Image (tube, helix red, strand yellow):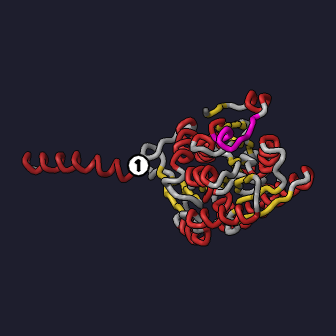
Amino acid sequence: MRRRDFIKLVAGSAAARPLAARAQQPSLPVIGYLNASSAQGAAKQLAAFHKGLGEGGYNEGRNVAIEYRWAESQFGRLPAMMADLVHRQVAVIAATTTPAALAAKAAATTIPVVFETASDPVRLGLVPSLNRPGGNVTGITSLSVEMGPKRLELLHELIPTARVIGLLVNEADTALAKSQLRAVQSAANTLGLELQVVNAGSEHDFDAAFDKLTELRAGGLVISAENVFTRGMEQLAKLTVRHSVPAIFYYREFAAAGGLASYGPDITESYRMAGIYVARILKGEKPSELPVQQVTKFELYLNLKTANALGINVPLPLSGRADEVFE
């Protein structure tokens, strides 16, 4: 072989080696992320999920890829989105929010699923047991629905003379609405209160819902733990002030925006824990061997400025229990 041809052969081989090496590198594992809300509405929760992933050793774009599917509160889109993730054969599915969790449970029979739900996953049929989930599904519950009775009790403590209390639900989110109604109705019966259910499926329904509350002469309002209300909590807080309706929700931001009170689990902790579980499954652990975890941190927020405007005297023991008071 002539020297010039030999140099060309060596140079060509050297140039090809990086390409071959890249071709031999394994592709990144892919997480399917399914959520009933929107990327904008669930930005804080998504950041917490990424934090959990990072704690487990995974960072998007570096050693894992994520396929996002947002239903924008159109729950009917979830089955098709889920089917697409199954077709793409993602490594694990993070089904955050209750409607997404139910869609994932129905569609994924072999792909590992980590859910995040505000309700009881056993009652929803997601797992047969919290300690022994079995199968391919496990996850995190904040049990926010189960906090509905506690929110009603706190509201009753703040406005003990009110006999008619409204419960704002999104009837399109069937499973969550029914669970919430059942739990809060039982508590209302115990307290001797009349519970009136008002429906709102989107932010466009909020004004009509408050008109209905006025018609029903509701002396207070419990807002159920659903995505549409989370996304529109600042709008809801303003409406409660405008209509002089003492109300309680479960996010701090509601009380900060003018709502009377907020009580519930730290939802960002729920998403962080889901991210950790996804990382553990990517490392080889089986969902069937990971017990469903529950968020145990609960927070109470009170807005004294709103209380004063509504003529409500907040009991000193209650304000003393608050994690934060807005004045």
Q: Is residue 163 magenta?
A: no
Identify which residue is drawn at 75% across, 48% down. Answer: 143
Residue 112 in the image: state x and y as whole percent.
Answer: 65, 55
Q: Nearer the viewer, residue 306 or 319?
A: 306
Q: Name the residue under label 1.
A: 25
In this picture, residue 45 sits left or right of residue 3: right
Secondary structure, mark 1, is loop
Q: Nearer the viewer, residue 270 or 279?
A: 270
Question: The disc labelled 1 sits on which kind of residue?
Answer: Gln
Identify which residue is drawn at 76% across, 53% down. Answer: 219
Residue 150 in sight: no
Q: Quadrant of residue 297?
A: top right
Identify which residue is drawn at 78% across, 50% down. Answer: 148
Q: Quadrant of residue 186?
A: bottom right
Which quarter of the rendering shows the C terminus? top right
Q: Which of 256 and 15 is in front in this view?
A: 256
In this picture, residue 38 sits left or right of residue 291: left
From the viewer's perspective, is residue 30 above or below residue 294? below
> Magenta segment, which residues?
306-314
From the viewer's perspective, is residue 177 above or below residue 302? below
Residue 205 in the image: state x and y as whole percent.
Answer: 60, 66
Q: Nearer the viewer, residue 11 or 47?
A: 47
Identify which residue is drawn at 71% across, 41% down. Answer: 311
